[in-house]
Each structure stands twice: as C-alpha cells, then as structure tokens.
Image: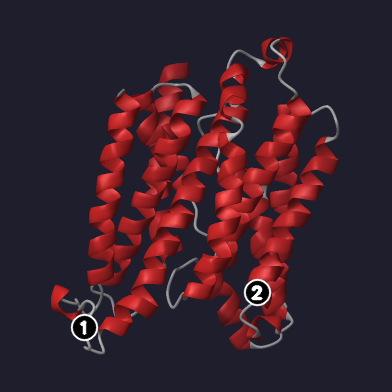
Amino acid sequence: MIANRLNAALAVAIIVAGGLSLLAGKAWLPWGVWFSDDPRWLIVVELRAPRTVLALVIGAALGMSGAAMQGYLRNPLADPGLFGVSSGAALGAVVSMFFGFALSPFLLPAFALMGAAITMALLVLIAGRSASILVFTLAGVIVSSIAGAMTALAVSLAPTPFATSEIVTWLMGALTDRSWSDAALAVPLVLAGMALLVATARTLDALTLGETAARSMGVDPARLQMLIVTGVGLCVGASVASAGAIGFVGLIVPHLVRPLVGARPSATLLPSALGGALLLLVADTLVRIAPTVIELRLGIAMAMLGGPFFLLLLVRLRRKIA
C-alpha cells in the first residue's frame, strides 16, 4: 500500500517536473508558444522534449539497475558502475572518437554498446559457471579497472587536441544537444533491460536468505546472473551510449526509497526507476537554468551530489558496525 502511494507520488512529481523541464532553460518559454506558429516552439519540440525523454529514460534505467545490483550483491553500496559495464561502454565510445569514427551519428552509440556487450561477455567468462557473487564482484572490479586504464591511455595518446577535448567532454556526461534519434536508440534498449531486471524480482527476494537457502528454493544462480548482467548491461550501455558517463543515480535513489518500501529488493525496483527518472530530470533542469556561462555537465553535477552522499553512507555504516 505504501509502495503504491510512493509510486503514485513519484509519477505526479515526474509529470510536474517534465512540464517545467520543457519550459526551463537559459531562455524560459511561456505556455503561449506551445502548439503555435511561434518559432520558439521548435526549441521545445526539437531540443527540450528529446532531452526530457532521455533524462527520464536514463534516470529510470540507472535507478532500477542500482536497486537490482544492490539486491543481487546484498550490498547497499553497490552501483551499476561496479560491474564495469559503464566503463566498458565509455571505452567503446572513446575508441570511436579516438579513430574519428564518431563523425557518424550512429557509430559512437554503436561502439559504446559494443563496449558494453564485450564487458558483459568478459564478466560471464571470468566469473565462470559457479555464479559465485564474490567472484562476480571481483570480476567486475577487474574489468572496470582495465577499461578505465585503457580509457586514460586513449586520452593521453589522442591524435589531436580536439580529439582529447571531445573525449574528456563526452566522459563528463550530459544531455546537451541530444535529439530524437538518441532517444530512439536508448528507449527500446532500456525497456528491454528493465524488463529483464523486473523478471529477477522474486529471485532477488529469495537471495536475501543467502545463496544456500536460495538454491534450496529452486533458484538457478547462473540464470539469475545472466539476467542481471544482460539487464544491467542493456540499461547502462544504452545510457552511456546516448548521454556519456553519469554516475551515482543507481547508488542514491535505492537508498532514498528503501526506508519507505521495505528491504525486499522486489519492492524497490519500480520506485527506484521512478525516483531515478525524477532525480535526473530535476538535475538536468537545474544545470540548464544555473547562472553559468557554459552549461554545467550533468555528470559533474551528479558527482558533486553523489560524492557527499556516498561519504554519508560510509559514515552511517561504520557507526552501525561499531
């Protein structure tokens, strides 16, 4: 009952924030220009509307991915970036920019999705058939470290200063100048990934009793691992491919909704998706209206918010352990 009320409240907040997102910017657009012959209406249709849709889709994807990962790893500090999928997707995009393939509007997202796919395959190969959560977590850390090192290598060896600037700017993450083609790429992949994560809901609940107990209840660890890897890979890979690296959404949102809906992982999936969509939409609106000469990158804004939040979580956990 509480979960339903929370979901309804989040949905209403998303509708309100979505309307404000279409109006807000360096130049505020009044309601009078909507559906009119005023040329400013094109700003809403071609620039702000796809940006709003992407913020909602990416936020929902990262929020649900974070909730699913925290349930699977039984670790409240887990984040989609821990699997290394976001690092792999970022590396794929950087490779496309390094060799100049990003001049085509479709090659950069394609390389990013390819990087995410390769990362997912490496995770499964390294973890092996045992489907051990510990081994899987270590595999994610290893893959993430390697992808991060190769990304840094690409930045340092970039052939031109322009390429270096493009890579660094893209890695900061943003929804600036995104179009309907970017939304068309992200939406189906994210929906497919979220569907796979929703399919793990009951299994994640069983896993809270421990791996041994979950196996005795008929849980197939290998199947669960494959669903989680594929679901998170699609969500995170599509997000990175369309907006660059944006972190901390999957860490922050599940922590905010969990006290309201309970500790069951299945109960946190949908609220985390809605909360993630709302958080990223509000954050993107704020960076647009911020009084800065150049628009603040969304990835930087989320890092400024997520860093102190992560530190607060560590302090709280330390007090509980002590």
Which element carries disc 1, helix, strand or loop? loop
Relative image position of residue 164 (x, y in whole percent): 61, 80
- Label 2 amino acid? Leu
The structure residue drawn at horizontal position 60% and vertical position 56%, both measured from the top left corner, is 189
- The N terminus, quarter of image: top left
Task: Name the mark nearer the viewer: 2 or 1.
Answer: 1
240 versus 232 height, above or below: below
Q: Is residue 20 left or right of residue 93?
A: left
106 versus 66 height, above or below: below
Are dots 2 and 1 in contact, CB under 8 Å?
A: no
Which element carries disc 2, helix, strand or loop? helix
Q: Earlier in the sequence, mark 2 or mark 1?
A: 1
The structure residue drawn at horizontal position 67% and vertical position 71%, both measured from the top left corner, is 94
As measured in the structure, the alpha-carbon distance from the residue carrying label 2 to the one carrying label 1 is 35 Å
Q: Is residue 12 left or right of residue 162?
A: left
Q: Nearer the viewer, residue 278 or 196?
A: 196
Query: Which residue is tagged 1?
Result: 36
- Label 1 amino acid? Ser
Relative image position of residue 18 (x, y in whole percent): 29, 59
Query: Which residue is tagged 2?
Result: 108
The structure residue drawn at horizontal position 65% and vertical position 50%, both measured from the top left corner, is 233
The local crowd at label 2, few if under 14, some if 14 to 19, many if 20 or more residues have their Cα within 10 Å, is: many
Task: Name the image quarter holding residue 253.
Answer: top left
The structure residue drawn at horizontal position 74% and vertical position 45%, both measured from the top left corner, is 142
Q: Is residue 154 left or right of residue 9?
A: right
- Can residue 24 be seen at all in this image of the molecule? no
- The C terminus, quarter of image: top left
Relative image position of residue 14 (x, y in whole percent): 30, 51
Q: Nearer the viewer, residue 100 or 320?
A: 100
